Image: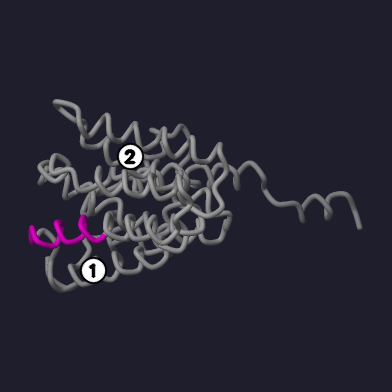
Amino acid sequence: MSSISALAELPQLERRTLSDTVYEALSDLLASGRLAPGDRLSLRQSAAALGVSVMPVREAVSRLAADGVLEVAPNRVIRVPVMSAAAFRALAETRIAVEGIAVARAAERRSAGELAAIRQAEAAFRMEAEAAHPDRTRAVQLNRVLHFAIYGACGLAPLQEIIARLWLKAGPVINLDLRAHPERLLQGFALRRHAEALAAIEIRDGAAASAAIAADIREAADFILSRGGLRDHQGEE
């Protein structure tokens, strides 16, 4: 085999790294609630913001579209999908089941260092939520940091990957709701459930920790659905 043939078989490391980096950056925007359903993205503007060419952005968008968290219209407009109420209910129930497994395992097996990280994340969210004028976008981001600090202690990387995909779909809806209804943050539902989860994790009570996170997800979903901001049928605009 010639050296040229051998080199041709090597993966294009730089291009792959750029595509992965862009994918992670766009995923972070979705999961952390900085994009809302209906928001549009431009390939060129995204590439310019990230300091890369259009190609890795296009590749990342294709991956996210395959995951169902972005959609590309026939006119090549890229946007965050607008979720139906039924789809959001199904997403919430799926999150309760999957994330419940993760938090129960995390409570039972967490290390001292992981517990310290969870405590720090809970305190950061509480400080922002209880501020006189809380930054709602930052609160959404800190909520995600706390949840993933918990899930990171479960010890199951495939489970964490599944949860991360679910959050790509949930993040934009949560952000849209907080934009329209900032009072949800002030009502303190999440603060109470987070405190309950932390207390359960501290004493390694997996069932109680799972119940607290399930209540956190369900109460947020019920509030969002009660406001009627999600369309009832996928075909409606």
From mark 2 to mark 1, how far is it between C-alphas? 22 Å
- Secondary structure state at the residue bearing disc 2: helix
Q: Specify whether 112 is left or right of 230.
A: right
Tell me, yes or no, if residue 63 can be seen here.
no
The main secondary structure of the magenta stretch is helix
* Range shown magenta: 218-228
Looking at the rendered structure, the secondary structure element under dot 1 is: helix
Residue at horizontal 25%, vertical 42%?
191
Q: Amino acid at mark 1?
A: Arg
Q: Is residue 133 above or below residue 165?
A: above
CA neighbours of label 2 inside 10 A, class few (<14), some (14 to 19), many (20+) = some
Residue at left offset 8%, top offset 61%? 228
* Residue beneath disc 2: 141
- Residue at 25% x, 37% y is 137
Q: Is residue 116 visible?
A: yes
Q: Is residue 101 magenta?
A: no
